[in-house]
Image: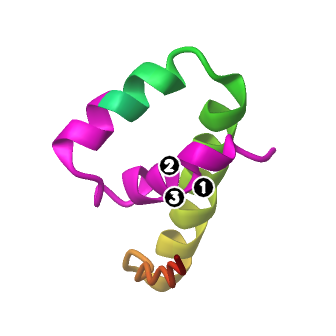
Amino acid sequence: MYPCRRYEESVILLSHQELGRKKAVTLQKHLSQCERCRAYLDELNHVFQIIENRSGSSPDLFLDIQC
């Protein structure tokens, strides 16, 4: 499932606990109302858990954000 375009980057950062507190609060409000973004977060968490279980460590997150 695809998240709302506006929140995609924030969902990824939240999945790695790398989202700032203020943005995390805003995203949590959105997640409480948006099934698509919640499903996307669940998928990311599942994938990262599989990677962590196989490698023994959390995957590094590199985002190439282009303006």
Q: Is residue 56 found inside the magenta-colored segment of the image?
A: no
Q: Residue at x 41, y 33 (%)?
A: 27
Element at badge 1?
Answer: helix
Disc 1 residue type (three-letter): Leu
Q: Which residue is denoted by mark 1 in the rendering?
A: 44
Disc 3 residue type (three-letter): Glu
- Label disc, if present, on residue 17 of the rendered structure: none
In the picture, residue 28 is in which quadrant?
Answer: top left
- Relative to 24, residue 64 above or below: below
Q: Position of residue 34 (x, y in %)?
A: 63, 22
CA distance separating discs 3 and 1 = 12 Å
- Relative to 8, residue 18 above or below: below
In the picture, residue 51 is in which quadrant?
Answer: bottom right
- Label disc, if present, on residue 9 of the rendered structure: 3
Q: Which residue is denoted by mark 2 in the rendering?
A: 11
Q: Residue at x 47, y 72 (%)?
A: 52
Residue closest to the eye, 61 or 23: 23
CA distance separating discs 1 and 2 = 9 Å
Q: Are marks 1 and 2 in contact (CB under 8 Å)?
A: yes
Q: Residues within 10 Å of mark 1 (few under 14, many from 20)?
A: some
Magenta highlight range:
1-25
Element at badge 2?
Answer: helix
Residue farthest toward the right in the current orientation of the protein: 1
CA distance separating discs 3 and 2 = 5 Å
